[in-house]
Image: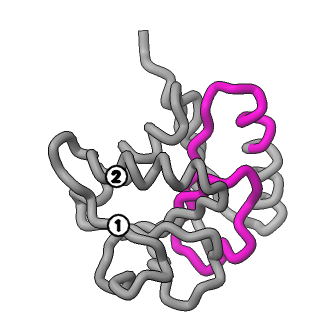
Amino acid sequence: MTKIFFYHNVAHRLQAACDLIVKSFAQGKTFTILVSDPEREKFVDRMLWVQPQLSFLPHCRADAANAAETPVLLTSDTGLPHLHTERLLNLDDNAPESFIRFQNLIEIVSQSEADRANARQRSRVYKEQGCEIRFIDMRPSE
């Protein structure tokens, strides 16, 4: 069964997503990133070119010729057969269609009310499917 992780109370959703990918990549983890919005995809792609600073995190679109050898894949379709299934990072506003084929699903939730409302709806979908959900509060400690 897919394990769901909600990282919430982040200041900037897409920046936090890139930071998480960089940390996981350093540990040898692979990622599929679901991002259907072209502007979000452009932002994430650009961030992965410069994260970590003065470096490059190997990534490409899931339909690229070198996708099988690339640790981080960007896609708008979780049903593609050759995606990395260890971790799915959802950057869409809705629950992914084929999320149960992934071992882990990661959600990043900012402090904006619209983002939080969308996350609550996704959480309900996952609970209805019987998934285990962990909530990790990313609010800086004072």
- Circle number at residue 48: 2
- Please state which of residues 81 and 43 is positioned toward the viewer in this rendering: 43
Measure the alpha-carbon separation of dots 1 and 2. Answer: 7 Å
Element under label 2? helix
Please count the marks in the image.
2
Answer with left or right where residue 19 lies relative to residue 117: left
Which quadrant would the N terminus be assigned to in this image?
bottom right
- Circle number at residue 99: none
Do tag 1 and tag 2 residues touch (Cβ < 8 Å)? yes
Image point (32%, 76%), residue name: 70
Where is residue 139? Give x, y as percent. Answer: 50, 23
Check the image and report above or below for 43 versus 74.
Answer: above
Answer with left or right where residue 133 lies relative to residue 22: right
Extent of the magenta region: 89-118
Answer with left or right where residue 37 lies relative to residue 89: right
Check the image and report above or below for 62 versus 54.
Answer: below
Residue tagged by mark 1? 59
Of the image marks 1 and 2, the number of the one nearer the N terminus: 2
Where is residue 141? Give x, y as percent. Answer: 43, 16
Answer with left or right where residue 28 lies relative to residue 21: left
Check the image and report above or below for 133 versus 14.
Answer: below
Check the image and report above or below for 35 versus 67.
Answer: above
Image point (57%, 49%), residue name: 40
